Amino acid sequence: MPLKYKIMRMKTVFVTILIIASLFAVNSADAQIRKIPAEVTDAFKVKYPSANGVEWKDKLTVFQANFLLDGEKYEAKFNNTGDWQETEKNLDQEKLPAAIKDGFSKSKFTDWEQKQITYIEKKDGAEQYRILVRKSDIEKKYLFFDKSGKLIRDAITL
């Protein structure tokens, strides 16, 4: 058999082995995903009985439910025993409370562009507003305000 046919045959065998190995890797990755515990889904149904379009994600430390409620998108997080941790909802600039707008205008970030605003309800009853701001394509931060408009902290985002 000529050398070029041997090389083509070896390439075919190599590609076949790679395909089979990748199929096993995909099946192994699927096996790593945990099933959402019944305690978590039951707690979600109690907290949000009229939610629809629910999609679950396993975030390793929490289970996250993305859902619709009254036509708006929400994201709720529960620990593995079903204890609710927090719920987030994106807001439009017009829906941002006056206290938060005032707090932002008094902060050192007033010249930064607001990109995304999120309302966060915490398990301890605290309410926060997270504003993603950008000064350039490189400088981005999350600003966290309490419901009175006080800047609690800022955090660098990647």
Image: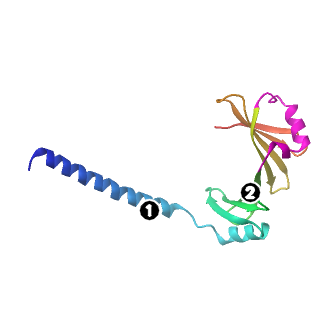
Question: Is residue 6 visible in this depiction of the protein?
Answer: yes
Real-space Cα separation, disc 2 to disc 1, in angstroms: 31 Å
Callout 1: few (<14), some (14-19), or many (20+) C-alpha neighbours within 10 Å? few
Q: Is residue 36 left or right of residue 5?
A: right
Choose top left, top right, bottom left or bottom right for residue 41: bottom right
Which residue is rendered at x = 62% and y = 55% of the image?
59
Tell me residue 102's x, y (percent). Answer: 90, 36
Choose top left, top right, bottom left or bottom right for residue 45: bottom right
Callout 2: few (<14), some (14-19), or many (20+) C-alpha neighbours within 10 Å? some
Magenta range is: 90-112
Residue 29 within the segment the image draws in magenta: no
Of label 2 and label 1, which has the lower sequence position? 1
In this rendering, is residue 125 above or below 143?
below
Q: Quadrant of the C terminus?
A: top right
Tell me residue 74's x, y (percent). Answer: 74, 57
Label 1: state its secondary structure: helix
Residue assigned mark 1: 27
